Amino acid sequence: MSKKKGLSKRECATARSTKAHTVSLEPSGKATNGGAGNGGHDRLDRSALNNSNEFYDVACKVMLVGDSGVGKTCLLVRFKDGAFLSGSFISTVGIDFRNKVVAVDDAKVKLQIWDTAGQERFRSVTHAYYRDAHALLLLYDITNRPSFENIRAWLTEIHEYAQQNVVIMLLGNKGDMTAERAVKKDEGERLAKEYGIPFMETSAKTGLNVELAFTAIANATSTPH
């Protein structure tokens, strides 16, 4: 199966170029792009505002995908609000989204983060949103072996419906629950290496690598060549 590659800044707003780019993480956690880019990039005017009256330069659509119950909504709430949704499991119905503006060097990137339902009955809804996504955070639960084993199926689906050069990052979520671990960290690393995508373990509860993951996406989609 063809591997998905990274998306350059020039493609973030327009997604017109067909040339793929590699996204990697430096030890510092900053994303870097490899390869040469061309084509136009529609940098938004500084007067552009999001719904929180924050200025931004570039808008980028990010999707959270993966099985139901892997913690997509909790990850989003942790990143957006700095809080953890404790208590009963709440399943996303259909699709929801939130915005957050992050600083990348001298630019402000508005991440439009879409939280998708993992249940099969909502899959057709999710498919429709793949097409213009610039980045995908693909999650599994380190305490739930089947959610990891389903990653290949998710990648096949992404290959079918998403644009060719979408950014993908694999996240092993619930990294704080080490006593209940069912998926070794090196298994996630090997799978990510096989598909040529970045990987890290995260925890919505403790905040482990949550900011880093989203910041890496913002860097990957806004750093010029």
Image: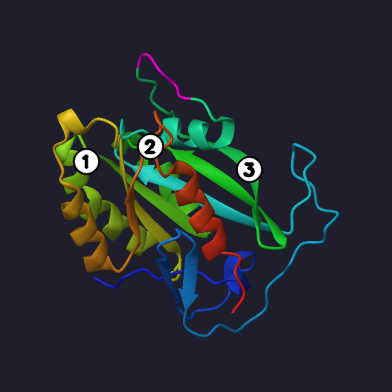
The answer to whether residue 102 is left or right of residue 33 is right
Tell me the element at label 3. Answer: strand
The answer to which image quadrant residue 75 occupies is: top left
Q: How is the image coloured?
A: rainbow
Query: Residue 26 placed where, x, y %?
Result: 42, 66
The answer to whether residue 181 is left or right of residue 130 is left
Q: What stretch is highlighted in magenta?
A: 84-88
**Placement of the N terminus among the 4 image quadrants:** bottom left
Q: Could you say which disc has been placed on residue 100 in the image? A: 3
From the image, state whether disc 3 or disc 1 is nearer to you. 3
How many callouts does the rendering have?
A: 3
The one nearer the camera, 208 or 97, is 208
Q: Image point 16% across, 43% down: which residue?
A: 183
Identify the mark nearer the N-term, 1 or 2. 2
The answer to which image quadrant residue 24 occupies is: bottom left
Q: Label 1 sits on what residue type? A: Ser
Farthest-out residue, front: 28
Q: Distance between the residues labelled 3 and 1?
A: 27 Å
Q: Can residue 47 be seen in this view?
A: yes
Residue identified by numbered label 1: 147
Q: Label 2 sits on what residue type? A: Phe
Residue identified by numbered label 2: 122
Identify the mark nearer the N-term, 3 or 2. 3
Q: Image point 49% across, 32% down: which residue?
A: 78
Tell me the element at label 1. Answer: helix
Instruction: Say few, some or many: other residues with alpha carbon within 10 Å of mark 1 (under 14 / 14 to 19 / 20 or more).
Output: some
Q: Image point 29% across, 37% down: which residue?
A: 175
Q: How far apart are marks 1 and 2 (CA)?
A: 17 Å
Q: Label 3 sits on what residue type? A: Lys
Instruction: Say few, some or many: other residues with alpha carbon within 10 Å of mark 2 (under 14 / 14 to 19 / 20 or more).
Output: some
Farthest-out residue, top: 87
- The main secondary structure of the magenta stretch is loop
